[in-house]
Structures are given as C-alpha cells and as structure tokens.
Image: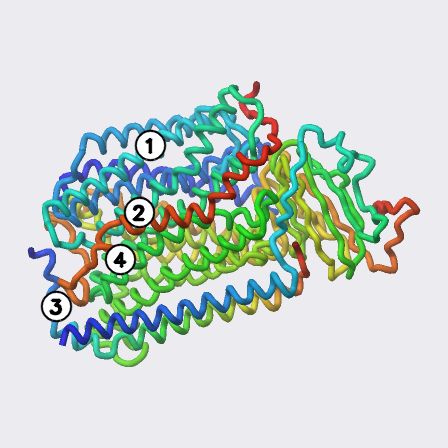
C-alpha cells in the first residue's frame, strides 16, 4: 500500500467528483439544444453557465487532479522510493482545491460565461481566472516534485535507467511546464489586468496566439498518462511484456517535442497569421501523429506477444487468445478503437485547408469528445480500477461490473459523437443553446441530435456506475495488498538505455528551437507592428 | 539468442516507422496539392483595422456593406459582424464566379462558415478577414456565427443567397442586395 | 524483487517472439491503411467538391 495513498486518493476523488457533476451537466445541455421539449425553458445565460462549468471541470479539474494523483502513485511505486517533498504536495493540493472552489463559485455567480477557452475581449470576473491560476501553480509544484524524485533516483542509482513508467510521467511534467507558459502569459499580462479594470483594451490577436500555445499540448498532457498505461500496465495485464522499452521512450520524447510547437493549427481560420506559419505548423502536427502511430504498433506487438504466450496462433489468432475479461486489457482495446475514429478526425482537422471544412462545427466537438472523453478517459477509468485495491485496502468491484462500465462508456461515446461528425459536415456549428428546427436548412439535423443525446445518457449512466464501482462497500473483502505495483517488464530486460532517453536535456533544447521557429515571429509580430486593440467586454459589469 | 532477437525488434520498429512516415507523407502531399493546385488554403490575409472606428472607416461604413461589383469586375461582399447580428443579414452572390468576402467587427470575436462550402474564417477584432471562393451550388446557404460571442450567439445567423450567373444583376452603382422573398 | 518477476522465463518470451510482430504488422497495417483510405475518401468526395477557399 503506497505511503502516499491518502494524498493520491484526495486528488482522485476531486477529479472524479468534478467528472460526475460535469457529465450530468453535459447531458442536460444536450437535451436543451435538442428538438425535444424540456420541462422549463431556461435563458441562454444558464445554458452557457453550464457549458462553462462542464468544460472547466472536464478539461481542467478532472485532468489535472487525476494526473497529479496518478503521478504521485507512479513516483512511489515506479521508483520504489518515498515521494520527496510530501508537505509541498499536500500544500499544492490545498491550493488547487482553493482554486477550484474559487472558479466554481465564480461560475455559479453567473459572471463568468466565457467557456473554458475564455477568449477575450469577453472577460469574466477576476476570481474565475485567479482560481485557474492557483490550479496551474499547484500543478507546477507537482512537476517539480516529479523531476526531483527522478533526479534523486538517478543520483542514488548511477548507471541504472529510470523505469519507463516514471520517465513517461516526468516527460509529462516537462511537457506541462512548457505548455502552461502560453496561457500563464495571457492570463497574467493581458486578461487579469483587464478583469481587474486596470486596462480597457486588449490585443486579441496576441491573446489568441498565446492561448493557442497551450491549447494543443494541454491535450497531450491529458493523453500521456493513458499512453503510460498502454506501455507499462496493459502488457502485464495481458500476461505479456512490452515489445520495446526503447521505442516507448523514443515515442514519449517525440510526443513532447512535436506536441508543443503546433498550437497554430487551432488558428488555421484566424486572420492574424499568414499561410507560411500555418503550413509550418501543419507539418509539425503531421510529425506528432508519428509517435501515436508508433505506439499503435508497439502496443499491438506487445499484445501479440501476450496472445502468443497464451497459445494464440496465426496472423490474428493471438487477438482472441488475449484475456479480454481483464478490465485493463478490455479498456486498451476499446481505447484503440476510439483512437481510430478520434485520431482520424484529428488528421482531418490538422490538414491545413481541410480545416476550413470543419472548423467550429460539431465535427470538432465530436473529435475531442471521442479522443479525450473516449480513448483517454477510458484509460483513466482502467488505471483507477487497477490501483484502487492498493490505495483503499479493499478488493476491487467485480471485473464484470468494471467491464460493463467500460463497454457502456465506449458505446455511449460512439453513439454520441458519430452523429456529431456528420452534423458538423452539414454545417452545424458550435456552442449553440438553441437551434431553430423550423428552419428547413436545420430541420433534418433534429433526429441526429436526438441520437446523440441517447449516447450522452448512456455515458452518464456509465459515469455513475464508475463511481459506484470505486465506492468501498462493506461487502468487498479487506485485503492486504502486495507492496508497490507490478509494472510491465520489457521483452528484453536489462538492455542498455542511451543517456538521451534517460533524461530530458536534448529534448528541451529541441523544444526551444522548434518553439522559436514555429512561434517566434507569430508572437513577436504583435510587438513589432502596433496592433489595434479591442475594447474589453466585462461580464461582471463595470 | 537474445541479442539477435533484440535486433529483430529494432528492425521491425524501424520498418513500421517507415510505413508511418509514408502514411503521413500521403496526407501532406494531398494537402500541398489542394493548396497549390486547387487553391484551397486557410484564409490568411493579414490586414489590420481599428475596431473602434469601424463604422467610420471608408470600407465598412454601413452604406458600403453588402455585395458590390468593383470597377475591375471583382465581386466583393462586405459584412460587419456584431453582437449579435450580421449587417447585412443577407448577401447575394453569383455561382461559378470567383468572389471575395470581407468581414470585420467592432466588438468581440466572431466567426463564420457557409454551409456546404469550404468558406470558413474567424472574425477577430483588429483585423479584416478576407475569403476568396467560388460557389459551386446555388441556394440560400446558412452563414451562422460559429464562435461563442456572448449570450446571443445562438441567434446570430445570416444567409448567403447564391444565384445562377444569369440571375445576378447588380445595379448601375455595382451594388446588389437580397430581394425580399 | 518479487514485483519484477512476472512469472515468465526468457525462453518462453523468445519462443513467443518468433512470430511476433507479424500479427502487429497485420493489425496495425490494416487499421492505419484503412485510416488513410478514409482520409483520402473524405478529401476527394467531401472536401474538394466544396470548392476553393483562400
């Protein structure tokens, strides 16, 4: 049982509570904008309040708290050492919780309907942003603790490679430190002065560009723990080993260097950047697809190894031989199915001119619900199921109930998001509270919106089942869990790991160079040529 | 032996890596072809304009909005997006002819798409958004504001009326507006 | 350490590695191939017909 189990559980419960509340809001939102009548008509303000809460909870609270908690688990069980700086970790936790309360209460006040992307000149009350700043600052403490833990391991174990699970987790910490610079600059230097009334105008081109710096790599921050489970948990759960530890390390490094300098692909349709930089970032985005495709192969090979160890024969016989009754194995398979659709949608989004076909339509909403809500979050569930017994000291809920929850999540996600892809191509646009279904151009969308809603309801039921599966009940046996956690071994243990894949020095340099090339001029241009500023639109009045 | 086996692993990963690069290259080549040969690029005309004086600017003053055929034959539709309406709410344009849309706004971020086409652009305070296109099909196409711009976002809708070239008759000053239907 | 021992012998692993990664090539190749085909289909039949933009 990890020494830090209380710290870890504290983080995970906040993450999952926010998740469940946001799931309920999501379903309500879908009902509101469907052709089905609702008991009470609500004003647009309430709808957008809900959208803001849903986005902030799912994108900032579920993710950051889960990643921090899982990271603390990995630091202890992966390195087989106590976490350094436990007091700092608890301090950061309380700062983060305070931040969440601040942001949630400000959303409840109705003065922050800016959505989780909070694009200026729409400006919320300062409390909204300060709350998010506190969460980010707490996460920076987590980053430092992860890197300190890894550095101390290396100092005390010279010549020994850092276990892949911790290397990947620290890669995520390095990624996050680079990622948050953009939004931190936007919030501290542009938005907070505007929210506090210190400035009356704001450079919108600059703020969108700074936010875009964060907007892409943040999704890789969310993704990396799921990939960590693919590489270090799924192979062992399947009864096999990781096909290539070195490729795993390389893939994580490629993920971090190519996920950071690509934010302008969120700005393809923006008028403040030229085709030149948009094309450079298209190319870099195509490169970030590579480590995902490498992962598909390495994990498939690891699963194949496991299947053949269990007697699977022939080109595909190993698939059937895998222990699909184990939730971690099932979740991995379902995650890859959703990755085909979600990743495929992403390839279209990134394809430069093709982005014009889908920008700001329901296609985009479909893409990120499927890839994040689907492939990534299903692995968060699987990780929670895996580590829960050693955290709580209770046996896990039956595997059958876990599998049911995972299947419901996948089916719900597909039923919800596939119609959105179609509707997006029909021109259905985003962030709408009500559609006029009487308009003949919109009328045919109605039935598909209803189908989507059914998917959403299944997801909510799955979310509630997830919580029920975690809740310790008297009927579950108390257990004495084995110390630590048994991560997957590489197929060839004891191999030599080059220094470049045991640290981050080279990769930090590459990131700096790529950022200079990809974002140098796009940001500097706002300081070189005076831009016209927009008037701040404060929602809090004044 | 383990060494040979490890080399096999490395070789297989390298082979897959090459397949991956080939797959991604197919996409990049198609993207470049679409951009260079078919003229499909993200609208990226970087042009600054002061949002605070928009209604006073020569170009985006109300009398100059809507569709106009310039002296050199170029067809341009000028639209202002505000919270929460398009001015004008309907523009009329001919099919199978190169046309240009120019949009700007005085207040917050908006964005537009024209359904069934590749016309899509953000409309950001401080900049003019310019989109060149050729409409292939006729009809009353939906042009919603697709970026959250505040509480009235859901109602912010316009129409692009695409008519066959034979029905596109601008007046003597080059202007043409949507007739009431 | 007991955790590290996953109960498999290196011999077992080597035997299973004989046919690996043929199955992975097949599965990954098929799925990624289908992905590219789907992308090209949308490119040709939905995207290009919608006309130029720039």
- Label 1: which secondary element: helix
Q: Check contact, mark 2 vs mark 4: CB within 8 A.
A: no
Residue A249: which disc? 4
Question: Can you say which quadrant of the picture contains the N terminus of chain A?
Answer: top left
Query: Do the residues at pointers 3 and 1 share their chain?
Result: no
State which mark lies toward you, 1 or 4. 4
Q: Check contact, mark 2 vs mark 3: CB within 8 A.
A: no
Q: Which residue is mark 2?
A: A172
Q: Which residue is mark 1?
A: A137
Q: Check contact, mark 2 vs mark 1: CB within 8 A.
A: no
* Residue B128 image-quadrant placement: top right
Q: Is residue B169 left or right of residue A157?
A: right
Residue A111 drawn above or below residue A349: above
Q: Residues within 10 Å of mark 1 (few under 14, many from 20)?
A: some
Q: Residue at x 41, y 42 (%)?
A: A59
Q: Gap in Å between the C-alphas at discs 3 and 1? A: 44 Å
Q: Which residue is mark 3?
A: C8
């Amino acid at each position: 049982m990890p020494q830090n189990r209380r710290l870890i559980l504290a983080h995970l419960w906040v993450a999952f509570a926010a998740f469940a509340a946001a799931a309920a809001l999501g379903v309500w939102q879908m009902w509101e904008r469907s052709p089905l009548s609702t008991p009470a008509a609500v004003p647009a303000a309430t709808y957008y309040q809900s959208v803001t809460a849903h986005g902030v909870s799912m994108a900032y609270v579920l993710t950051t708290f889960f990643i921090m908690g899982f990271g603390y688990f990995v630091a202890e069980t992966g390195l087989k050492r106590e976490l350094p700086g436990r007091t700092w970790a608890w301090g950061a936790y309380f700062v983060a919780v305070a931040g969440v309360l601040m942001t949630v209460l400000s959303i409840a006040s109705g003065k922050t309907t800016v959505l989780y992307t909070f694009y200026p000149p729409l400006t919320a009350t300062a409390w909204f942003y300060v709350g998010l700043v506190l969460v980010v600052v707490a996460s920076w403490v987590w980053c430092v603790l992860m890197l300190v833990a890894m550095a101390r391991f290396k100092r005390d174990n010279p010549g020994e490679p850092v276990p892949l699970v911790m290397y990947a987790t620290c890669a995520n910490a390095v990624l996050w430190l680079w990622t948050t610079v953009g939004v931190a600059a936007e919030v501290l230097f542009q938005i907070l002065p505007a929210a506090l009334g210190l400035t009356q105008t704001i450079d919108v081109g600059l703020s969108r560009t700074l936010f875009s710096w964060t907007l892409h790599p943040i999704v890789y921050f969310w993704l990396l723990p799921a990939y960590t489970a693919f590489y270090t948990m799924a192979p062992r759960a399947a009864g096999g080993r990781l096909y290539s530890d070195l490729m795993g390390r390389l893939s994580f490094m490629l993920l971090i260097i190519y996920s950071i300098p690509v934010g302008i692909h969120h700005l393809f349709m923006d008028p403040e950047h030229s085709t030149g930089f948009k094309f450079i970032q298209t190319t870099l985005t195509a490169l970030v697809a590579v480590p995902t495709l490498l992962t598909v192969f390495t994990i498939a090979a690891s699963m194949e190894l496991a299947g053949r160890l269990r007697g699977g024969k022939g080109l595909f016989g190993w698939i059937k031989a895998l222990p699909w009754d184990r939730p971690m194995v099932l979740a991995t398979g379902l995650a890859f199915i959703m990755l085909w659709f979600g990743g495929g949608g992403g390839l279209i989004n990134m394809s430069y001119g093709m982005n014009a076909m889908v920008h700001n339509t329901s296609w985009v909403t479909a893409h990120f619900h499927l890839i994040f809500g689907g492939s990534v979050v299903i692995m968060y569930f699987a990780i929670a199921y895996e580590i829960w017994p050693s955290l709580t000291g209770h046996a896990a809920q039956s595997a059958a109930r876990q599998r049911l929850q995972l299947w419901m999540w996948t089916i719900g996600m597909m039923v919800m998001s596939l119609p959105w892809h179609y509707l997006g191509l029909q021109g259905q646009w985003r962030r709408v509270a009500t559609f006029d279904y009487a308009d003949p151009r919109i009328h045919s969308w109605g039935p598909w919106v209803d189908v989507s809603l059914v998917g959403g309801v299944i997801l909510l039921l799955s979310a509630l089942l997830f919580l029920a599966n975690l809740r310790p009940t008297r009927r579950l046996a108390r257990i004495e869990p084995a110390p630590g956690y048994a991560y997957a071994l590489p197929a060839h243990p004891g191999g030599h790991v080059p220094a470049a894949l045991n640290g981050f020095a080279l990769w930090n340099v590459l990131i700096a160079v790529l950022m200079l090339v990809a974002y140098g001029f796009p940001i500097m241009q706002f300081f070189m040529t005076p831009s016209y500023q927009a008037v701040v639109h404060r929602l809090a009045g004044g | 032996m383990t060494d040979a086996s490890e080399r096999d692993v490395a070789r297989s990963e390298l082979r897959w890596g090459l397949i991956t690069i080939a797959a991604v290259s197919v996409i990049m080549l198609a993207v470049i072809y679409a951009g260079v040969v078919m003229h499909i690029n993200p609208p990226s005309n970087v042009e600054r304009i002061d949002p605070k004086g928009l209604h006073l600017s020569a170009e985006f003053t109300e009398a100059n909005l809507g569709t106009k055929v310039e002296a050199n034959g170029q067809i341009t539709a000028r639209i202002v997006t505000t919270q929460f309406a398009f001015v004008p709410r309907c523009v009329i344009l001919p099919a199978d002819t190169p046309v240009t849309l120019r949009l700007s706004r005085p207040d917050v971020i908006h964005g537009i798409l024209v359904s069934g086409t590749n016309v899509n652009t953000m409309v950001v305070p401080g900049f003019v958004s310019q989109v060149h296109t050729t409409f292939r099909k006729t009809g009353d196409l939906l042009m919603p504001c697709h970026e959250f711009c505040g509480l009235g976002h859901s109602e912010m809708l316009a129409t692009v009326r695409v008519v066959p070239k034979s029905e596109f008759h601008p007046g003597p000053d080059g202007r043409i507006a949507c007739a009431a239907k | 350490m007991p955790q590290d021992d996953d109960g498999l012998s290196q011999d077992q692993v080597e035997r299973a590695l004989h046919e690996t990664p043929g199955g992975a090539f097949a599965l990954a190749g098929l799925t990624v191939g289908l992905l590219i085909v789907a992308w090209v289909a949308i490119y040709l039949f939905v995207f290009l017909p919608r006309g130029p933009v720039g």
